[in-house]
Amino acid sequence: MAILLDEMLKRTASWCRVLGIDTQFITGKSDTWLLQYAKKGKLVLVTKDMELFGRCQKQGVQCIFLKTDSREEQVAQIIRDTGVRMTFPERTRCPKCNGELAVVDAASVKDDVPETVADAQQRFWKCASCGKVYWEGSHWRNITRVYERVRALLELPQGGTETKDI
Ligand SMILES: [Zn+2]
């Protein structure tokens, strides 16, 4: 199952992707377009827009209305309401394009990253779709913190990687 986040939820979309959730995010389209797109692709539309939520209900499009501004609570609600799973840290997705990230060895990305990064980091990931290279930078700790917070909200055991059937 894939989800489609509306234009206002850019940050949430990035977080969902990093945590491994298959997340579509498309900008510059009207609500009517998004509705049709979700319907055709059998996607769950996620929004904070009450009016769009109402239109989804009328047209039989599965939709989640987010009640909170907290990114962790938003992600937790999406997981709870749809049954999608977080696959972080084993598998994560590119926050920019939703492509799957693959672990690559340092030598193969040497020319794609700044020299200081190439020297300091051992683990690299490369997006299979757009080719962007990621590494365990200072944001890694932040991602781990968000991940643990979402797990806590879902009452999943801390620190583990197993997922619960919802
Ligand atoms: Zn990408």
Image (cartoon, rainbow, N blue to C red):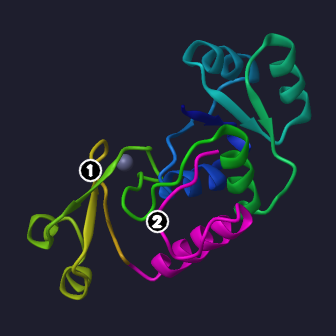
* Figure check: 121 above or below 99: below
Q: Position of residue 113 (x, y in %)?
A: 24, 70
Q: Which mark is residue 131?
A: 1
Q: Is residue 89 shown left or right of residue 145?
A: left
Query: Is the CB of mark 1 within 8 Å of ligand 1?
Result: yes
Q: Position of residue 130 (x, y in %)?
A: 31, 45
- Mark 2 or 1, nearer chain start: 1
Q: Position of residue 22 (x, y in %)?
A: 49, 41
Label 2 residue SS? loop
Q: Is residue 159 shown left or right of residue 63?
A: left
**Amino acid identity at mark 1:** Gly
Dot 1 alpha-carbon crowd within 10 angstroms: few under 14, some 14 to 19, many 20 or more: some
Check if residue 162 falls in the magenta segment. yes
Label 1 residue SS? loop
Q: Position of residue 13 (x, y in %)?
A: 60, 49
Disc 2 marks which residue?
A: 161
Q: CA distance from mark 2 to mark 1?
A: 26 Å
**Amino acid identity at mark 2:** Thr
* Figure check: 92 above or below 137: above
> Residue 91 falls in which quadrant of the image?
bottom left
Any part of residue 73 in sight: yes
Name which residue lies at 66% across and 29% down.
44
Any part of residue 26 in sight: no
